[in-house]
Amino acid sequence: MTAAVFAPALAGPGVELLRSDGGSAPLDTDRWRSTAAGEDSWLLGRCHGPTLDLGCGPGRLIEGLAARGIPALGVDVAAEAVAQCHRRGAEVLHADLFDPLPGEGTWSHVLLADGNLGIGGDPVALLRRTASLIGPAGTVLVELDATEPGLWQGLARLRWDHGAGRMELSNPFPWAAAGVAALPGIARRAGLRLTMLYRGQRTFAELAGWS
């Protein structure tokens, strides 16, 4: 699964995402490994019941929710992510997000933060998966790409610095990036609707079902 490629990004700084269209962006690995802070509070504040964090990485959002008394479970396919979650005491499941998961159809909230809407390169399929996980009154909280004007889908690679000028490239993997303009159409095709939008240094959206 795509998310396993991100294991090197969890181990150190200096990781960059390279897109097949020539675009590139540094990954904020320091934020991933830190405690929840800053605009993370918008995501945490929208969660009022049991929450599933897909592609949870080192688990800062799970930890932040637990501190607020919100039951939360992370899901990540990368062993390094799971290990870091365990070290901070965050509840995590080592699994592919498309595998059978506990409590399907009952979660109050599902998180796709830190660019995870790109996992698998098909945001519609991914949002359909999240829609199957939430209960009738549940919501999906998504982080969008503030620099992406529409929807980009293609191949990407990670490039990271081993120090002393030694750079390494991952194998290509399918990836996607969606901006605000593309979200309503993507959500509608996935059986979801936009209910709230936050735009600051980062951009978040809340989605819910139609019924």
Image (spheres, helix red, strand yellow):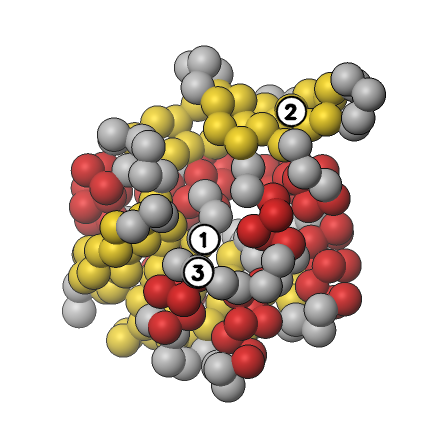
Residue 154 visible here: yes
Rendering coords of residue 198 (x, y %): 25, 55
Q: Return the residue at label 3.
A: 38
Q: Are marks 3 and 1 in contact (CB under 8 Å)?
A: no
Rendering coords of residue 14 (x, y %): 65, 32
User: Badge 2: how crowded within 10 Å, few (<14), some, or many (20+)?
Assistant: many
Q: Which mark is residue 159?
A: 2
Label located before the other in sequence (1 or 2): 1
Question: Which numbered disc, 3 or 2, marks the residue closer to the eye?
Answer: 3
Label located before the other in sequence (3 or 2): 3
Asked whether 138 or 72 is in front, the reply is 72
Q: CA distance from mark 1 to mark 2?
A: 21 Å
Q: Secondary structure at mark 3?
A: loop
* On screen, residue 2 above or below 108: above
Rendering coords of residue 56 (x, y %): 57, 57
In the image, what residue type sits under mark 3?
Gly
